[in-house]
Image (cartoon, grey):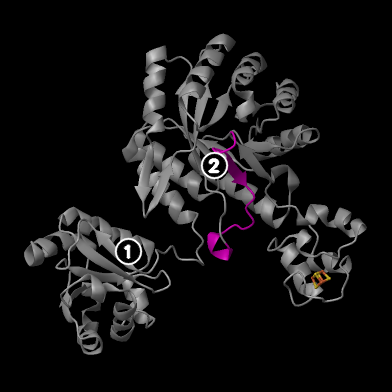
């Protein structure tokens, strides 16, 4: 049972010294109960209190690490149900499944294809995270050979899928030092599989059949090994969504320890479009790993974009550095566009201007990472502010003209910007997609 803020408060020094960053011990206790701080922030807690509070201050969902150093992925350690309450911290890992039934050349080609599933989006490189090798053959040696062939060709973390302890042991003998995720301990095999997890010090997935049976099995396994990931065994999408939501709720709101572990989910559909929809649901609520068969860029890109949107901090808009960006081989005569420093806005504009093939300058104004209309409504992107930044950013020394293009959505600031800056203002298209045609019409 979780401790309340008052329970915690009774165990604190009650000196209100503020060293933890909170104004009072009570405020610290309430923050600790809500998982918004950690016990180590208070340097004055007694050893006895630490022991009692250890459980209350532990994260409601355990942090579990998979993969070798440098390519490691962290799962779990989330503290809220909804991202707008704070943020989600450890993005869902996308794992692509490979069968050990593939021939040597097929397997090699498949790993190469999966390795290439990486993309540039809003200035960041995003990719899949794991390769899952499934023991479809039922043969331990075939499984070990496939694991070795995959390990030789990729740096991604690995999931070893087999419920046969003999096959798992052979697979771990190949790759155990790289900390693969062992999948899975079941009611039938958990004693042997837990021994393997301990021997190789690897994270272990526990597979149950529904919520109650999974919680009961996790309790048995966790008695001797705690680096766990949960699979509820449900492959029906709506039922899995309901159960995974219950797991998150029970772990965070009730501190129900048997379900306080990251969750792994598997897509079930053979239809590529449906499989992406399943994975989207699991990324949204609340899988830490989603294992899928899809391996086309057109399938993975939307999932990585969705994941990026969900796992950004809603209180910190994603932004680029406010400055002048040069697109292509610019000269003193190149056109100048102005936009905000919201990442998505900037990179959308940048992509379209690059596509126009006309070297240009883009001025990303400091708007605290807000989009054009939001920044304008907040008074951060008006004639006065842009004129100030035109002076500060150095563009006046970079070009020999004084012409600037503003987004069509803020055409209303044209007069004020001309008056404050002395620059001639041209109103560009409202949508960035109109920029290539606009550029060709005005600057080609
Ligand atoms: S550091 Fe500890 S003793 Fe000081 S105010 Fe915070 S909780 Fe209280």
Q: Is residue 284 visible?
A: yes
Ligand 1 quadrant assignment: bottom right
Quadrant where the image shows the C terminus: bottom left
Q: Left or right: where does residue 426 sit relative to residue 51?
A: left
Q: Left or right: where does residue 294 sit relative to residue 185?
A: left
Q: CA distance from mark 1 to mark 2?
A: 37 Å
Q: Residues within 10 Å of mark 1 (few under 14, many from 20)?
A: many
Pick out the residue farthest to the front: 397
Q: Which residue is mark 2?
A: 239
- The local secondary structure at tag 1 comes to helix
Q: Which residue is mark 1?
A: 345
Residue 215: x and y in percent read: 71, 39
Q: Earlier in the sequence, mark 1 or mark 2?
A: 2
Q: Residues within 10 Å of mark 2 (few under 14, many from 20)?
A: few
Residue 275, numbered circle? none
Residue name at image x 82 percent, y 76 percent: 17
Residue name at image x 19 percent, y 53 percent: 355
**Can you tell which quarter of the image residue 325 is in?**
bottom left
């Amino acid at each position: 049972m979780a401790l309340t803020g008052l329970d915690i408060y009774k165990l604190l020094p009650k000196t209100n010294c503020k060293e933890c960053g909170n104004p009072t011990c009570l405020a610290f206790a309430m923050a600790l109960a809500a998982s918004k701080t950690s016990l180590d922030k208070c340097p004055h807690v007694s050893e006895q209190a630490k022991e009692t509070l250890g459980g209350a201050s532990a994260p409601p969902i355990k942090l579990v690490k998979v993969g070798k150093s440098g390519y490691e992925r962290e799962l779990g350690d989330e503290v809220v149900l909804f991202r707008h309450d704070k943020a989600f911290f450890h993005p869902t890992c996308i794992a692509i499944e490979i069968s050990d039934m593939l021939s040597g050349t097929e397997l090699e080609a498949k790993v190469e294809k999966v390795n290439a599933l990486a993309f540039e989006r809003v200035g960041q490189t995003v990719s899949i995270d794991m390769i899952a090798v499934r023991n479809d053959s039922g043969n331990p040696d075939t499984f070990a050979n496939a694991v070795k062939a995959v390990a030789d060709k990729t740096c991604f973390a690995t999931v070893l899928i087999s419920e046969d302890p003999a096959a798992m042991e052979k697979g771990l003998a190949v790759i155990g030092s790289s900390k693969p995720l062992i999948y899975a301990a079941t009611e039938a095999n958990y004693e042997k599989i837990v021994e393997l997890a301990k021997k190789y010090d690897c994270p272990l997935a526990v597979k149950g059949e529904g919520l109650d049976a999974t919680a009961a099995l996790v309790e048995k396994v966790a008695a001797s090994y705690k680096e766990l990931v949960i699979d509820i065994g449900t492959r029906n999408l709506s039922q899995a969504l309901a159960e995974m939501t219950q797991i998150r709720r029970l772990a965070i709101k009730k501190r129900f320890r048997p379900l306080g572990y990251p969750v792994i989910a598997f897509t079930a559909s053979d239809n590529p479009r449906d499989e992406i929809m399943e994975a989207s649901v699991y990324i949204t609520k609340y899988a830490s790993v989603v294992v899928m068969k899809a391996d086309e860029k057109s399938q993975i890109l939307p999932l990585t974009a969705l994941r990026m949107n969900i796992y950004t901090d809603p209180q910190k808009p994603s932004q680029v550095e406010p400055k002048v960006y040069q697109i292509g081989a610019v000269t003193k005569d190149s056109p100048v566009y102005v936009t905000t420093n919201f990442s998505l806005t900037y990179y959308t504009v940048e992509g379209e201007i690059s596509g126009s093939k006309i070297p240009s300058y883009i001025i990303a104004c400091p708007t605290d990472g807000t989009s054009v209309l939001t920044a304008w409504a907040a008074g951060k992107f008006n004639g006065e502010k842009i004129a100030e930044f035109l002076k500060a950013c150095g563009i006046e020394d970079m070009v020999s003209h004084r012409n600037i293009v503003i987004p069509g959505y803020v055409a209303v600031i044209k007069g004020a910007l001309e008056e404050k800056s002395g620059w001639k203002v041209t109103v560009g298209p409202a949508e960035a997609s109109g920029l290539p045609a606009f550029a060709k019409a005005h600057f080609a």
